[in-house]
Amino acid sequence: MTSNKKVLAFIEETKALCDPKEVVWVDGSEEQLEAFRKQAVEEGILIKLNQEKLPGCYLHRTTQNDVARVEGRTYICSKNKDDSSPINNWMESGEAYDMLKKLFKGCMKGRTLYVIPYSMGAVGSKFSKIGIELTDSIYVVLNMAIMTRVGQKVLDVLGDGDFVKGLHSYAELSEEKRYICHFPEDDTIISINSNYGGNVLLGKKCFALRIASYLGKKEGWMAEHMLILGVQYPNGETKYIAAAFPSACGKTNLAMLIPPEVYRKKGYKVWCVGDDIAWIRVGEDGRLYAVNPENGFFGVAPGTNEKSNPNALHTTQKNTIFTNVAYNADTGTVWWEGLDKNPPKNGVDWKGNPWNGDTKDADGKPVKGAHPNSRFTAPAVNCPCLSKEFENPDGVPLSAIVFGGRRAKTAPLVYQSTSWNNGVFVGSSMASETTAAATGAVGVVRRDPMAMRPFVGYNMGDYFAHWIEMGKKIKNPPKIFNVNWFRTDDEGHFIWPGFGDNMRVLDWILARCEDKVDAVETPIGYVPKAEDINIEGLDDITTDTVKGLLEIDKETWKEEAEGIEKFYGELTRVPQELKDELAALKKRLDA
Ligand code: SAT
Ligand code: MN
């Protein structure tokens, strides 16, 4: 398959350490993948779904202790502690390698070691990067084959070149011995004792964000936790937006948005370039260009339905692996909370127990059919609104960068920063309520700068400085905005309808990018005039509702500024430019 000495040495080392019974190269052919699927079904790892209703689709259930990313057990390993972040876990590289070697010793006895050559980005594009993942998990092989470009064609492009090393074993699936370790200084990722998504599909968060963010800092580009979408205007022109939201805050829904009828009738369309990760560079024309390095979607299933995201639902109707959703034993199909009102009568929940929509636990509490972080792994080509620029190796030019989180109060529906550095400040001070995408408490507000808190591969202050530096290199920078779809009323209900209606906010954002609409200057930035948010066709929303959604309460924002200051105090190397932005915000709030 390859004569690349570094690849061969990596495999030899791993064989000696892990003692697998055989080595199988993933060549990327459909024949081989089909054989893997068959084997996975025989071994009970996958359940084949109804092939008439869901051709090429399978269901997988993880171990119950292994259902989300484990931020507490995810490490940045470097020589010096301050080259990681006080808010991330750090281990000295040598110590980490020693510890991991012990855990990996003989861990693949009797198992197959799969070699997955994969490309992040279109194979052979000058902006793409190659990884080799070695794993004993056939589930990882099949998911990587959807999420990335895999196989011989990648090795052909690699030649004698360098690659990111990834070693994974599900080992004993022990929670206590679970480690997801990154060695940015060595282009290396090592993951053990998990078999869940972001912990083990090493091309995704581990490479495309943690390692790539470090490479981007070194090489002058950016790896960001952002969706990329294009808004096509009635005149045929398309403008692109990249948007950063924490995990499970609606990136997939926004990326695949279907505009409301008033917009559709006029001829507006939204195209999806990516739903999770953007690699961003400065183009020759001095604008920022973004590519999606992935080849599929690893989306949250619960809440996805014909209304909230029909494009995502259609994307999952073939060649998809479902993880931890409910099974309908009568139809051989899948179900999750929020899909429809017809849970299976004769179903099986994500834990493998008999289940119907009414199942209660010993305390009489309703039992969920699907885990809140259950997922679909679906090929990008399935997506009805996939952008024709999806494979464009040069990416798409960005008109706007949007930050956003889940905030019941404080943040208005949308506001615009006043400059690049002010926009970096807005991103750096983002906060959001935690979700089920990571283990730990759900619904707690925490600072999540640029939605990258769990994903920056080096010091967070240096990461902010890199944003500031990039700003100096971009002659025509995109404008930077913040959105919040999640403001609630006194009863805790969301006020803004969200989903397709978020188009109304994107419309304002893009109009601002072209100086086509005015705004109101406030202490935190530019806010729309309520009447400039198009509410035509919305039943429950009046201009007054919009006014409320755009309100900025000075006292709440003074507390917010305190919160930001406290957060900066937890970090090291925060650039002076951002401290100046914070001081200026405080001054404006006091004025
Ligand atoms: O588990 S993943 O990291 O792949 C998904 C997410 O948390 O965003
Ligand atoms: Mn994500």
Image: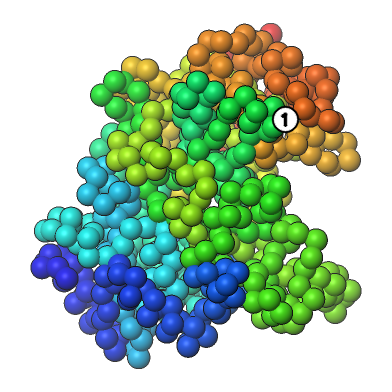
Nearest to the observer: residue 336 or residue 164: 336
**To which quarter of the image does residue 115 belong?**
bottom left
Mark 1 lies on residue: 410
- Which quadrant, please, contains the C terminus? top right
Does the image show residue 214?
no
Q: Secondary structure at mark 1?
A: loop
Identify the residue at image location x=69%, y=47%: 308
Identify the residue at image location x=44%, y=66%: 143
Q: Relative to 321, does residue 501 appear above or below in the rendering?
A: above
Location of residue 409 in the rendering, given as x and y in whole percent from the top left corner: 75, 33
Identify the residue at image location x=18%, y=55%: 157
Q: Name the amino acid type tagged 1.
A: Thr
Give left or right: position of 154 versus 519: left
Location of residue 94 in the rendering, given as x and y in whole percent from the top left corner: 29, 63
Location of residue 515 in the rendering, given as x and y in whole percent from the top left corner: 53, 10
Nearest to the observer: residue 191 or residue 333: 333
**To which quarter of the image does residue 552 belong?**
top right
